[in-house]
Amino acid sequence: MSRIPRIALTAGEPAGVGPELCVQIAQQARGAELAAELAVIADPQLLRQRAAALGLNIRLREIRPGEPPRPCEAGELGVIPVPLARPCKAGTLDTANAPYVLESLRLAADGALRGMFQAIVTAPVHKGVINDAGIPFTGHTEYFAEQTGAPLPVMMLAAGSLRVALATTHLPLKDVSAALTPTRLEQVARILYRDLREKFALDAPRILVCGLNPHAGEGGHLGSEEITVIEPVLTRLRAEGMDFLGPLPADTLFTPRHLRDADAVLAMYHDQGLPVLKHVGFGEAVNITLGLPIIRTSVDHGTALDLAGSGRAEPGSLRAALDLAIELSLARHD
């Protein structure tokens, strides 16, 4: 039983699809190689309501401190109860429940740091309603970095064999160039290389690096960041034996010829790399936060308020995030 990981699963925005996705992925039995205890941090009544709306049966088993993990059977979820501030209607946001969302994240981070959870998997939250409640919130990535004391989280999404990490994350496009300093780029690149080795067991990862500007700056005629920032950083890393190739034009980097022998791509900003990845694997892609002392994966989509409670939300991305979290947690403890 010591090999059975306990995975914290946060249900996200209560008005969104997160609660029902948690119920859906619990319906199928997991193979022995991915057996785990799923510990959903949520309001139990909310989970029962969504299960009833979808015509699904769910058995909730409260997880108590000190209990060893045991695999969840089909139709069963472990639960760590957190009460909603107000009853929730699917598809209708309520600022009163914003503290509930953050409390579920806090419990997940605290439990992972204390070893109660071997990984965290997060369903989507709604940043707008949390901020409308008067609580500054940028996103899961930044929140878990703050809670765990990680100096620099790195956002990476994976779909099949394609992995795309970001040098900058949730910034207006006009602010990207100023944020892309040599120090930041080098830190991100080192974290990406290290975690590909340590968490993904890649002995010598090969990483393709996008330029910031069209045509990777065209020798300085379309921008100078490739010359002044990106190339010097990559030269230093390559001198230490790290396999970084670039900077390459983003419009040709994401082609089979380049990607065939690559383990990951490092994009300079959010919408440079993620549209390609989501085109390849939307609904099955996984968001992984690198640079943390814990394992955290998430879905590749938002709260989908228009689908909440309808039964039309697809659980593929959450299932993929859970599978990867289990794989990484088992590998970490080999």
Image (cartoon, grey):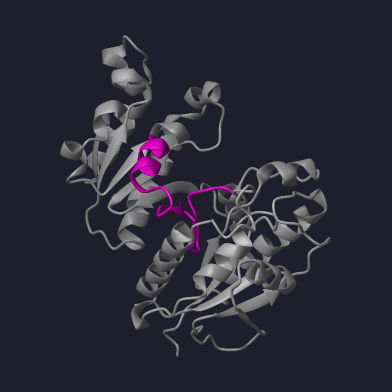
Which residue appears at 77% of the width and 46% of the height? 135
| Residue that protrudes farthest toward the top in the picture | 221
Residue 144 appears at what percent x and percent y? Answer: 59, 55
* Closer to us: 215 or 304: 304
Q: Indicate yes or no whether the magenta region holds residue 301.
A: yes
Residue 66 appears at what percent x and percent y? Answer: 63, 87
In this view of the protein, can residue 111 be seen by the observer? Answer: yes
Which residue appears at 50% of the width and 26% of the height? 176
Q: Indicate yes or no whether the magenta region holds residue 300.
A: yes
Would you identify the image quadrant in which residue 201 lies? bottom left
Looking at the rendered image, the quarter that the N terminus falls into is bottom left
| Residue that protrudes farthest toward the front in the picture | 55
Residue 121 appears at what percent x and percent y? Answer: 52, 63
- Magenta-tinted stretch: 273-302
In the displayed structure, would residue 29 be above or below residue 135? below
| Left or right of 176 on screen, residue 257 | left
